[in-house]
Amino acid sequence: MMMALVVDGDRRRRQVLGELLTGADVSDVGATNVALEYLTKRAYQLAVIGDPDDAVDGLPLAVAVEARGLRVPVVLVASGDATRLRARGRGCASVLEVISYDRAADQLPSILQHLPDWQPRAKRRRGRPPRVWLTDARGRPYRLAPSREPAVGFQVMYQESEGRLWRRLTDGQGWPLLMPLTATRSDFEQQVGRRPGTYQLLPVSSAGVLSGNPPEMIVLGDAGRTDQRDVT
């Protein structure tokens, strides 16, 4: 699957642009320095960068991508008319295309079709949508973001009922319970003994430090059924 990075200081714009990259594994960030770190550490096949913005200046970021020898095609998304930005971007080899945000819904899917790593998303069969084990705040499949302190597992926080104190679950030796990053739904239920309540999985590094955003909370019902709920 093609990996794409969306960079824009406006969260809503990042969400809209990310949803247009159908069939890609999308990450998003809101600041130039963070974006450059992401692009350096992971092999993205496309970067979609908003310009101009309070936290992101798209063309200088595209120039930095080229200067570091990163072979990442960049699509610059102008807030208004793209004409001036398109003229400025002609000298940057990493700039694949310059479009306006107002026309992104029409132009981004067309750009994707011309990228060698892009694969259209398979059509789903009609009927009940597939259940996802862990999701992020947008309801998408949860993925760990790159971090200087890579996560090695999930620690588990537990709340028996609303209003009760949260506590960190431990293993048989009294150490914080550490679930593998690849744990399945059944693995989780077995680890926590199917106790009803609300759970929060925390991705932690080898030093036990939080590493990246956690997935949505998990609610385990009386019948041992797991669900996730939005908490904003």
Image (tube, rainbow, N blue to C red):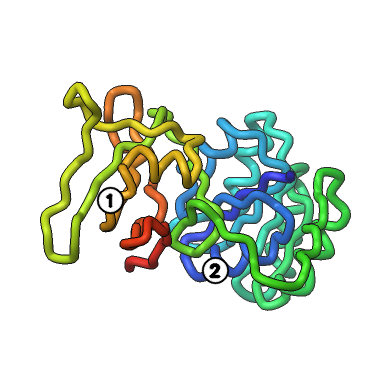
Quarter of the image with the C terminus is bottom left
In the rendered structure, find residue 110 and report the number of the disc placed on it.
none
For this rendering, which residue is in front, 67 or 133? 133
Disc 2 residue type (three-letter): Arg
For this rendering, which residue is in front, 62 or 205? 205
115 with respect to 18 (left or right): right
Q: Is residue 170 above or below residue 57?
A: above
> In this view of the protein, can residue 106 be seen by the observer?
yes
Residue at the spot 57% in from the left edge and 60% down from the top edge: 131
Percent of width and height locating residue 4: 66, 48
State yes or no: discs 1 and 2 in contact (Cβ < 8 Å). no
Q: Is residue 195 above or below residue 100?
A: above
Percent of width and height locating residue 160: 19, 56
Residue at the spot 26% in from the left edge and 57% down from the top edge: 197
Residue at the spot 68% in from the left edge and 45% down from the top edge: 3
Q: Is residue 106 above or below residue 167?
A: below
* Number of residue marks: 2
Percent of width and height locating residue 172: 22, 25
Foreground tag (1 vs 2) = 1
Disc 1 residue type (three-letter): Arg
68 with respect to 175 (left or right): right
In the rendered structure, find residue 195 and report the number of the disc placed on it.
1
Percent of width and height locating residue 187: 45, 39
Q: What is the crowding at mark 1: few (fewer than 14 residues within 10 Å), some, or many (at least 20)? A: some
For this rendering, which residue is in front, 224 or 161? 224
Element class at badge 1? loop
Furthest-front residue in this view: 223
Q: Which quadrant holds residue 84?
A: bottom right
Circle 2 is placed at which residue position? 13
- Of callouts 1 and 2, the N-terminal one: 2
* Marks 1/2: CA–CA distance: 40 Å
Q: Which quadrant holds residue 193?
A: top left
